[in-house]
Amino acid sequence: MSGCEGYSAIVGVYDKLNKDIDYSAWASFLEECFGRFGAVKPEIVLDLACGTGRMTRELAARGYDMIGVDGSADMLGEAYSAGGEGILYLLQDMRELELYGTVGATVCCLDSLNYLLGDGELSKVASLVHNYSDPDGLFIFDMNSEYKFENIYADNAYVLEDEGDDGAAIYCGWQNFYDKETGLCDFYLSVFTEDEGGAYIRADEHQRERCYTLEEVKKTLTDSGFELVGVYSGFGFENIDDNTERWYFVAKAKK
């Protein structure tokens, strides 16, 4: 099963609560990967689990033909409303990915693969990406590390605060519960959005992620027909260590 019951509670404020993410720097990292590891510059790029389409639009603006796939109609609705000339958006569960042809590269951002909870689901998605990849096509994705689940998420609680375009306040309370034995982490979110009268509207949401070990991910890629060409801790191609919170993987489809 998927680790998200939907994004109805946070879809309207998702980008505001994640405004610190530097999509331009991330896209530049992806392009550097295309140049370093790709046989040719990809023409068509798949943004898997594209969400509101922030990365999809960023790469489209850089000249790539983009396909954005996401399993949430709410998130794709935000992506559509934000525009982006020539982008093809598809409402699909990543575990049932079906494209019209192959792509030169697939990117998957913001730990979306950690939302694959069931045994074999990560392998299934990797195999589907391989199936729709050109020979030597790249698969670039990030995942939350074991260190992050055990030390940052754990059983901690966080509060995020921001302001909408209209000046209305937005609060998000976030409680985590991590089970090291199962590797599953539950996130309980409550979002409070200020209306015109100054009252706050509450919406609740539950999400869940699975912690995969580094060796599990490496084996999955190899078994799915990919050659792992690098794992990094940041956009500067830094090496990972025991305190790395997010792993950035770069793999190449061998056919």
Image (cartoon, rainbow, N blue to C red):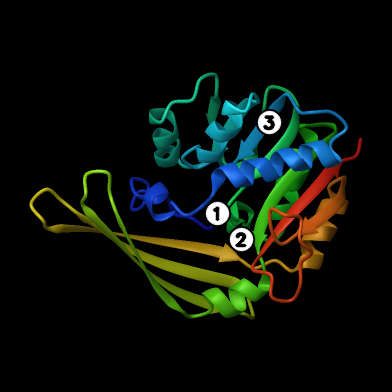
Residue 116 visible in the displayed image: yes
Secondary structure type for disc 2: loop
Q: Amino acid at mark 1?
A: Ser
The picture quadrant where one finds residue 238 is bottom right
Residue for point 58% across, 57% down: 115
Q: Return the residue nearer the eye: 178 or 150.
A: 150
Secondary structure type for disc 1: loop
Query: Callout 1: few (<14), some (14-19), or many (20+) C-alpha neighbours within 10 Å?
Result: some
Q: Earlier in the sequence, mark 2 or mark 1?
A: 1
Q: Position of residue 45 (x, y in %)?
A: 68, 31
Among all residues in the image, which is located at the extreme right? 255
- Disc 1 or disc 3, which is closer to the eye? 3
Does residue 8 sit above or below 129 in this rendering? below
Q: Earlier in the sequence, mark 2 or mark 3?
A: 3
Q: Position of residue 119 (x, y in %)?
A: 69, 61
The picture quadrant where one finds residue 129 is top right
Q: Which mark is residue 87?
A: none
Q: Which mark is residue 117?
A: 2
- Disc 2 or disc 3, which is closer to the eye? 3
Question: Image quadrant for the C terminus?
Answer: top right
Q: Position of residue 110 (x, y in %)?
A: 57, 53
Disc 3 designates what residue? 45
Residue for point 37% across, 50% down: 16
Secondary structure type for disc 3: strand
The picture quadrant where one finds residue 203 is bottom left
Q: Which mark is residue 2?
A: 1
Among all residues in the image, which is located at the extreme left? 197
Among all residues in the image, which is located at the extreme top? 86
Q: CA distance from mark 2 to mark 1?
A: 6 Å
Is 190 left or right of 255, judged from the image as shown?
left
Residue 183 visible in the displayed image: no
Callout 2–callout 1 Cβ contact below 8 Å:
yes
